[in-house]
Image (cartoon, rainbow, N blue to C red):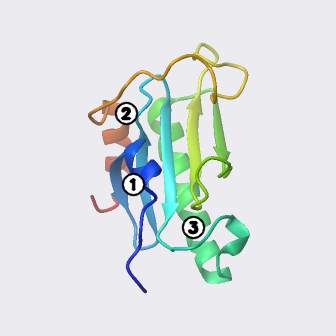
Amino acid sequence: MTDFNLDARLAADSLPLCQTDMSLLRVSRDARFAWLILIPKRDDLADLVDLSPDDETRVMADIRAASLALREVTQCHKLNVASLGNMVRQLHVHIIARFEDDAAWPGPIWGVGEAEPLDTLPDWAQSVRASLGWSA
């Protein structure tokens, strides 16, 4: 495998949490939401269908594990899992714990209010990392 290059905007807009051999897991810098971003460690991919069948299986397993850990830790009302990529082309998957009293409920989180800066990992994120047991 060649060296993996993380998109500059994803790097700037998120904090590193943990990783598998296939995926990076990062935390959005918007403190209003328990929001993970999973990025497959493959260059030049824009959509999930661009993954090889083997890599797709591995990425989906990582998405499932991260989603289950986030739901367990946050006890959220709903999980939103999406791969949009309209602003950042590099393949990445948003995993967001949603609550009926969050800043955007019941609508999407994008374009609602002002982001609240996050500079250190919150307790919920550290608990997700511990639950997953993935490398830092």
Circle 1 is placed at which residue position? Answer: 132
**Residue 81 shows which numbered tag?**
none
- Mark 2 neighbour class, 10 Å CA radius: few under 14, some 14 to 19, many 20 or more: few
Residue drawn where x is 52% and y is 29% of the image: 75
Cα separation between marks 1 and 3 = 14 Å
Circle 3 is placed at which residue position? Answer: 59
Specify the amino acid type for callout 1.
Answer: Leu
Q: Which residue of the protein is positioned furthest toward the bottom in this rendering? A: 1
Q: Earlier in the sequence, mark 1 or mark 2?
A: 2
Front residue of this view, candidates 42 and 68:
42
Give the side of residue 62 with respect to residue 50, left or right.
left
| Residue 61: quarter of image | bottom right
Mark 1 vs mark 3: give the one in front. 3
Give the side of residue 111 with respect to residue 3, left or right.
right
Circle 2 is placed at which residue position? Answer: 124
Cα separation between marks 2 and 3 = 22 Å
